[in-house]
Image (cartoon, rainbow, N blue to C red):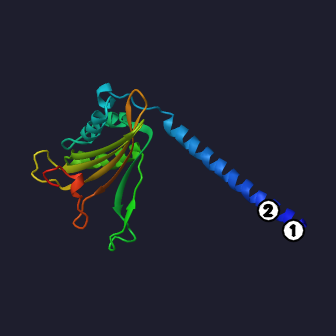
Amino acid sequence: MKSGRACNRRDAVRVSSAAALAVLATGSSTRAAQVEDSKGPVPAKPEDVGTMDAIIAAVYAAISGPAGGRDWDRLRSLFHPSARLIPCVPSPQGKEQGLKATRVFTVEEFIKVIEPRVKAEGFYEHEIARRVERFGAVAHVFSTYESRHAEGDPKPFTRGINSIQLFFDGKRWWTVTIFWDSETPGQAIPGEYLPKKEG
């Protein structure tokens, strides 16, 4: 009996410790979100966020243009305060094996990375195909894109798929996540995600 009680006490301590860690982790995440949200979202143009089509078009438009500046506040206004942008990149440890990793950016971090690039060289990204699934306030969009340095370039220098998660709060749409990967010689975009004439 003593052994059983001792085991129960040890189990209780382990459960209590795990619960405490969970509470602390949740509290830390909540505080981090509160700090990130403290500035509040940048007001959006109603025409940019009124429909799913509008917000997707606005995201592409906000990052596209000739070499120079961009309207970063417009880009900020399209994203939820806790939004993330996540590109797939070659894994530093397994690049030769074709392994991949991800990088996770807040909107501000993404702007810091892309701003010097678009100042130095033109960048135009256009959607060429889309697949949408929606339930209630949640929508998932597979948006196939092409990227060019000049709008009139005959061929894109890259293309890929943006996996976009959107949220509708009853008044407007918010971009919650954009998670993307690019086409490579060994990874072609499947036909079902291309315009019908290419598929």
**Disc nearest the viewer among 2 and 1:** 1
Seen at 14% across and 47% down, the residue is 150
Can you tell which quarter of the image residue 14 is in?
bottom right
**Number of callouts:** 2
At 31% from the left edge and 35% from the top edge, which residue is drawn?
A: 52
Residue 113 relative to residue 34: left or right: left
**Are discs 2 and 1 less than 8 Å apart at CB?**
no
> Residue type at mark 1?
Ser
Q: Position of residue 62 (x, y in %)?
A: 27, 38
Going from N to C along the chain, the mark reached first, 2 or 1, is: 1
Closer to the camera, 165 or 88? 165
Percent across and percent down for residue 91 are: 37, 66
Q: Name the quarter where the C terminus is drawn.
A: bottom left
Q: Secondary structure at mark 1?
A: helix
> Dot 2 lies on which element?
helix
Q: Which residue carries the number 1 mark?
A: 3
Give whichever of 140, 83 is nearer the camera: 140
Is residue 159 at least partly visible in the picture? Answer: no
